[in-house]
Amino acid sequence: NAGVMQNPRHLVRRRGQEARLRCSPMKGHSHVYWYRQLPEEGLKFMVYLQKENIIDESGMPKERFSAEFPKEGPSILRIQQVVRGDSAAYFCASSPGDSIAKNIQYFGAGTRLSVL
Amino acid sequence: QKEVEQDPGPLSVPEGAIVSLNCTYSNSAFQYFMWYRQYSRKGPELLMYTYSSGNKEDGRFTAQVDKSSKYISLFIRDSQPSDSATYLCAMSVGNNNDMRFGAGTRLTVKP
């Protein structure tokens, strides 16, 4: 998973602040996914994006959360007015998006968000 | 009922043991089956990838898929302390946005 770059690795925010999580996909990958992982729980799908398009955001809370994958630059997961319940590890994955290989997702190291 | 069920463990075995990790699922449309390994405070790392039914072997790791029983397994032979991690199963119908993960099984291999 060395190819998918996420930053920051750790992010501390106070309640009410904004959190911005960045993800650069593997070279050649055009599909990006964001997941949330709580302790002792599996990965929960949040959103799936291609360049300049949100394909599926069914797993993302309707309020305070947004995601983008601009033509240039990394994908951004943005959480406004954070609350303590937002504390979790957020993982980004990318895939090539062509034929059978499109289903293989490669993960970054994650961003661990702590809300004080 | 969850779409993907995985026993969270924890599972503890002595070094050299054969480890069997399993997942069951309910959606018969799943065709792609993956196993990821996740070390503590790291991202999931793809271990094995299988399409449809059958077995796949890679070194000490063997993945099995039984679609008739909706059951997948990962076997680790000659387990090593470095195999201590959480193992996540994942599966997909074939669309990019339908990957479903198990909760993960935490494995400890004791020297």
Image (cartoon, coloured by chain):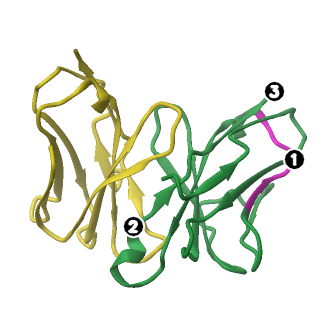
Picture coordinates of residue A39, whole percent (x, y): 52, 32
Seen from this angle, which residue lies furthest top? B111
Query: What residue does disc 1 label?
Result: A18
Say whether disc 1 or disc 3 marks the residue closer to the N-terminus. 1
Q: CA distance from mark 1 to mark 3?
A: 12 Å
Callout 2 crowding tier (Cα within 10 Å): few <14, some 14–19, many ≥20: many
Q: Chain of mark 1?
A: A
* Nearest the eye: A4 or A97: A4
Front residue of A91 and B47: B47
Q: Which chain is yellow?
A: B
Choose the circle earlier in sequence order: 2 or 3: 2
Q: Which residue is mark 2?
A: A104
Residue at 30% of width from left, 24% of height from top?
B10
Is A77 magenta? The answer is: yes
Residue at image x 18%, y 71%?
A: B52
Q: How many marks?
A: 3
Specify the colour of chain A: green
Q: Do tags 2 and 1 sit on the same chain?
A: yes
What secondary structure is found at the residue carrying circle 1? loop
Say which element carries label 3.
loop
- Along the line of sight, which residue is nearer the eye, A29 or A20? A29
Cβ–Cβ under 8 Å for marks 2 and 3: no
Which residue is identified by label 3?
A116
Residue B18 placed where, x, y %? 10, 32
Who's the residue at 11% across and 37% down the image? Answer: B77
* Disc 2 element: loop
> What range of the chain is rendered magenta?
A76-84
Check the residue under mark 2 and report the chain it is in. A
Residue B51: image quadrant is: bottom left
Residue B105 % position (x, y): 32, 35
The first of marks 2 and 1 along the sequence is 1
Amino acid type, callout 1: Glu
